[in-house]
Image (cartoon, coloured by chain):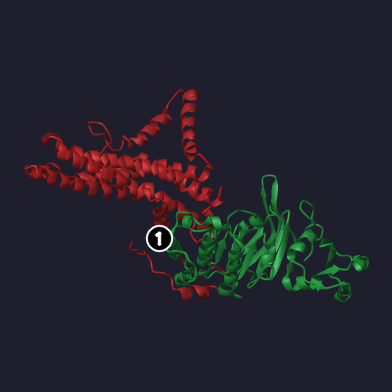
Amino acid sequence: MATVDPTDRPDPALGSQAGGSPAIGPALQSPLRLVYWSVRRELWENRFLYLVPLIVAALYLAAFTIGAMRLPLPAARPPGEALDFVSMVLMLTYVIISVIYCLGALHNERADRSILFWKSLPVSDVTTVVAKACFPIILLPLIIFAIIVVTQCITLLAGSAVLLARGVPAAQLWSQSSLLPMWAAMLYHLLTIHGLYYAPIYAWILLASGWARRAVFLWASLPVVAVLIVEKLVFNSSLFAHMLLSRLQGGSSAVPFPPRGGMPMQAPTLANVAAFVTSPGLWIGLAICAVFLAAAIRVRRYQGPI
Amino acid sequence: MSVIEANGLRKRFGATIALDGIDLKVEQGRILGLIGPNGAGKSTAINAILGLTPYQGQLRVLGCDPWATRDRLMREVAFIADVAVLPRWLRVSQAIEYVAGVHPRFDRVKAEGFLAKTTIQRNSRVRELSKGMVTQLHLALVMAIDARLLVLDEPTLGLDILYRKQFYDALLNDYFDHSRTIVVTTHQVEEIQNVLTDFMFIHHGRVVLTCSMEEFEARYAEVTVHPERLAAARELKPIHERQVFGRSTLLFERADRGRLQQLGDVRTPGIADVFVAVIGGPGTQPQAASG
């Protein structure tokens, strides 16, 4: 893989001169460079982050192509439903692998004792935790978006090829799907709802992953269940449950639900973006996310191998 | 400025006191061995020096507080804990790329050069390497870092003797010079005795003895005594006595060399033997506490 270094490598001569000085030398590594390498290390360690969606996409494409060849023509029309279907499947895949990733992110390095190796290098706990949090919140939505776009393109191409082979003009297939607005809506949906709006959930799982010695999933889920039960028994209310539900649904207040139900997925108009950016739900969520991440950073600082 | 300076370093885990007021001063160019039984506090001391654990008391490593500035400190401190810490999924080429990416004082060409002397394949994963090869890889990475302090915590644990010897040979011949400082803990004391410039006995979280090797050789002497001279030898107050093949070997501290030579062959003892004499076997309280 070709590498693009965000910054130039510091002059080694500079470093050795600094060796003579009493305090730590000026050989500063730019924070961006450290995050870049931390992100690459995550990709090396967690190849499932891109392999699983790729496999899902490949399976979908194989099934779709076989279906298009076998099924009678009306059923084989690919636009709309087929494209929606693959994006839904891949988004679901994304949510699942995000959760799996977060469960292991700060736990695996302690379990295999490699945390001692990572901590023997000049990378701070802040950089490490931020790089890990970047995956579910920013990087995975982008990766998934790219995979969805490519899969949909191949779906259309394969669909066209099948239609042509069966003697049907394929033009109608392309005219029915308005790709660009759909992709814009999807990217917006992925980044805002699944990335930013879900951020406190991922940060919570990261914290549990850094804190629990074993059974991370239990430590991540039991406190939530406990709050639900205690609230029900003590106050006979379910505010917390409603809060959680509304967060999982993407905050119904900020983005109106489409009439047919499901998650809001519409092209981002300026009004939508403004409503989202100014919604308290977003900022409360991000503040909670920041608190959980700060706790995760602190926990990683204290934790050693388990 | 000392490379490491600790005053009254303390650390407790609940009711257990791991470090009970350690004073330590390590100057540049020294190779210090931390020696003590399991649970003596060696690893805790090392973790404190590396900024891996908070502590009480004063500690300065290269002028910095390690707990507050671990990531900055690690630009000038290299560290091998034991062979298990390299992640098993990491490829050799990735390890080099990553360290080159994050470490400002890493010399990639040097690391490649060290690796070229081994049979390690560039695209192997750590899990595919033997334990000895993992150590070679880790050592190649660390020796390519222009660090001022190298900390080794049981670096050769579980390695066969060939790799152990190679490890210290490489370290001394290809890495160590008098601008660097090394702190090492190990159970295989005999193997590093001729490597060290200083050593320190730690027992129950306290420093029992610190000594430079020059001082050690002048201060301690071991004599294997003929049975008929044993009584005369005992009058010189040996600090320890043991039987080897039916003959008594006596360990003396600050005894007159001339008189010892009349008793038999005078040798420099092993650090391990002095350790047993000073600590007095497992479980007992320290007797001598001077340096």
Q: Is A32 displayed left or right of B287 in the figure?
A: left
Give the x, y percent position of residue B211. Answer: 74, 68
Q: Is residue B47 above or below residue A247?
A: below
Quarter of the image with the N terminus of chain B in it? bottom right
Give the quarter of the image for residue B280. bottom right
Secondary structure beneath label 1: helix
Give the x, y percent position of residue B281. Answer: 78, 55
Residue A79 appears in the rendering: no
Instruction: Tell me the red chain.
Output: A
For this rendering, which residue is in front, A208 or A1?
Answer: A1
Residue B29 appears in the rendering: yes
Give the x, y percent position of residue A191. Answer: 31, 46
For this rendering, which residue is in front, A101 or A10?
Answer: A101
Q: Is B280 displayed left or right of B263 in the figure?
A: left
What is the tally of numbered marks visible in this picture? 1
Q: Amino acid at mark 1?
A: Leu
Q: Is residue A89 above or below residue B219?
A: above
At 64% from the left and 56% from the top, the residue drawn is B43
Q: Which chain is mark 1 on? A: A
Instruction: Tell me the green chain.
Output: B
Give the quarter of the image for residue B161. bottom right
| Residue designated by label 1 | A32
At 52% from the left and 62% from the top, the residue drawn is B133
For this rendering, which residue is in front, B164 or A268?
Answer: B164
Give the x, y percent position of residue B83. Answer: 55, 58
At 37% from the left and 40% from the top, the residue drawn is A96
Q: Is residue A211 above or below residue B194?
A: above
